[in-house]
Image (cartoon, rainbow, N blue to C red):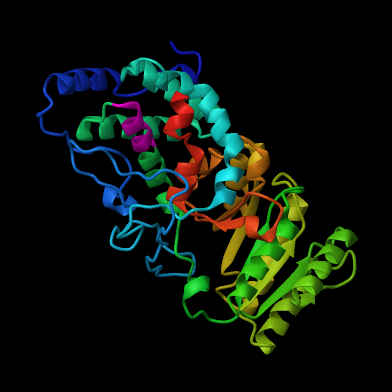
């Protein structure tokens, strides 16, 4: 009997071995049906899906990429699936040196774990996929998501008869990007008329960069020409209120605050009343950092939500959790607990530049299917990037030159 979940044999391994051997013997054999768990087709990613052709996944550094244009039917947006609108008409990735650099530690970590299987005589066998599974699991992708990714890659290799290291690397980028598509959503507050004010409740544990990230997102809205208001509902720390007020002054954004130790729900009430009177587009409420095990502080969040709902049954329209990517699987545990307690509806991942744990984006998407609004790849405002599945996947997976160098 296996001692742990890690010891369990991945599914369909023997089936792949038999099918791949048959595929190599007969290059004209028809492709197997795609049984991959992902739903987006390859045209969604702007790459060729025909058999007997090399995938057209572009290398990092190409430009003129297209943005997602899929329409969301609610404020949170819908998972990106329609190939007519997502990455449509273009086989390139928007050049973003900051994302590439921000994921360099994650990419280097993955390279150290899988680079050897692409060097020398490249053999497509079960050992390669075992190494890939181990590398993904140890890169904070999670066991379930890792097995799904490797199985999707197996099926893609069989279907499209991929043989070379470059083809397999590009195939890996494609299956990673497809698995991340549910996290890339068109944000209605960015692109569609909204009922004002759109209220975002910012939550998370201590030390994740919540207040600074809140200010950066506020500037994102201000740069779009929206009227933004901030609410300093972290009343446990006087420094937190002062920090948000300083950001408000720098960004010329009004901040609603009360004294140290004030009722956070009262701050939220005053902020909503003011935002409504001043025709504000977006109200962002910064809350105190807390652990999900701190029942009194979690109850405070519930109280804030109850007060807002009395004023507007739809508020808060979004509960965004800020996650420190450096905490890896612990961040996923935190997210699951907050999601259960207060209904987290979106995520922002910070500090990716200081961590080798970029794979947690895959674990989050596999587990909860929540939109990832932004990723933080540095300290500057410009380093807070809207999440793009294909660009993220291409920056996460080492290039073929890195793999074979």
Q: Residue at coordinates 69% horizontally, 52% vertically from top-left?
A: 204
Residue lying at the far top of the rendered structure: 1
* In the image: residue 387, left or right of residue 163: right
Left or right: 14 with respect to 149? left
Q: Quadrant of residue 132?
A: top left
Task: Say if 274 sits above or below 12 in the image.
Answer: below
The magenta stretch spans residue 124: no
Q: Is residue 392 visible?
A: yes
Residue 319 located left or right of residue 168: right
**Coordinates of residue 18 in the picture (x, y in percent):** 20, 18
> Residue 8 appears at what percent x and percent y?
42, 18
Quarter of the picture containing the N terminus is top left
What segment carries the magenta color?
Answer: 164-172
State whether residue 55 is above or below residue 146. Answer: below
In the rendered view, would you say 361 is above or below 155? below
Q: Residue at x 38, y 22 (%)?
A: 129
Q: Is residue 368 above or below residue 231?
A: above
Front residue (pair 136, 104) = 104
* Observer-nearest of 392 and 96: 96
Residue at 50%, 13% in the rendered image: 3
Q: Main secondary structure of the magenta part?
A: helix
Q: Nearer the viewer, residue 186 or 241?
A: 186
Q: Does residue 5 appear in this view?
A: no
Q: Position of residue 223 (x, y in %)?
A: 62, 74
């Amino acid at each position: 009997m296996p001692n742990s979940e890690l010891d369990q044999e991945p599914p369909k391994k023997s089936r792949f071995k038999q099918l791949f051997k048959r595929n190599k013997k007969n290059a004209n054999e028809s492709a197997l049906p795609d049984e991959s768990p992902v739903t987006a087709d390859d045209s969604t990613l702007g790459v060729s899906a025909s058999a007997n052709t090399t995938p057209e996944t572009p290398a990092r550094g190409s430009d003129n990429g297209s943005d997602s244009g899929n329409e969301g039917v609610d404020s949170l947006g819908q998972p990106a699936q329609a190939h007519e609108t997502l990455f449509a008409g273009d086989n390139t990735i928007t050049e973003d040196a900051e994302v590439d650099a921000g994921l360099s530690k994650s990419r280097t970590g993955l390279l150290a774990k899988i680079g050897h299987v692409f060097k020398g005589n490249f053999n497509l066998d079960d050992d390669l996929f075992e190494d890939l599974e181990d590398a993904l699991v140890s890169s904070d992708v999670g066991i379930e998501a890792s097995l799904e990714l490797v199985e999707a890659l197996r099926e893609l290799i069989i279907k499209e008869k991929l043989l070379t290291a470059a083809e397999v690397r590009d195939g890996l980028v494609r299956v990673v990007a497809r698995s991340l598509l549910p996290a890339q959503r068109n944000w209605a507050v960015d692109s569609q008329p909204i009922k004002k004010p759109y209220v975002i409740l910012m939550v998370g544990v201590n030390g994740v960069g919540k207040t600074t990230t809140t200010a950066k997102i506020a500037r994102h809205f201000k740069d779009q020409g929206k009227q933004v208001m901030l609410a300093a509902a972290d009343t446990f720390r006087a420094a937190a209120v002062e920090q948000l007020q300083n950001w408000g002054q720098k960004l010329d954004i009004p901040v609603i605050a009360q004294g140290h130790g004030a009722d956070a729900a009262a701050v939220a009430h005053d902020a909503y009343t003011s935002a409504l009177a001043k025709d504000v587009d977006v109200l962002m409420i910064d809350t105190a950092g807390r652990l999900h095990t701190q029942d009194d502080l979690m109850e405070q969040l519930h109280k804030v939500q109850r007060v807002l709902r009395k004023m507007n049954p739809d508020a808060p329209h979004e509960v965004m959790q800020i996650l420190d990517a450096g905490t890896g699987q612990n961040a996923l545990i935190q997210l699951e607990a907050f999601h259960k307690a207060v209904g987290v509806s979106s995520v922002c991942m910070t500090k990716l530049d200081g961590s080798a744990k970029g794979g947690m984006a895959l674990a989050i998407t596999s587990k909860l299917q929540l939109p990832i609004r932004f990723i933080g790849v540095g300290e500057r405002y410009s380093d807070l990037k809207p999440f793009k599945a294909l660009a993220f996947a291409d920056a996460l997976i080492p290039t073929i030159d890195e793999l074979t160098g």
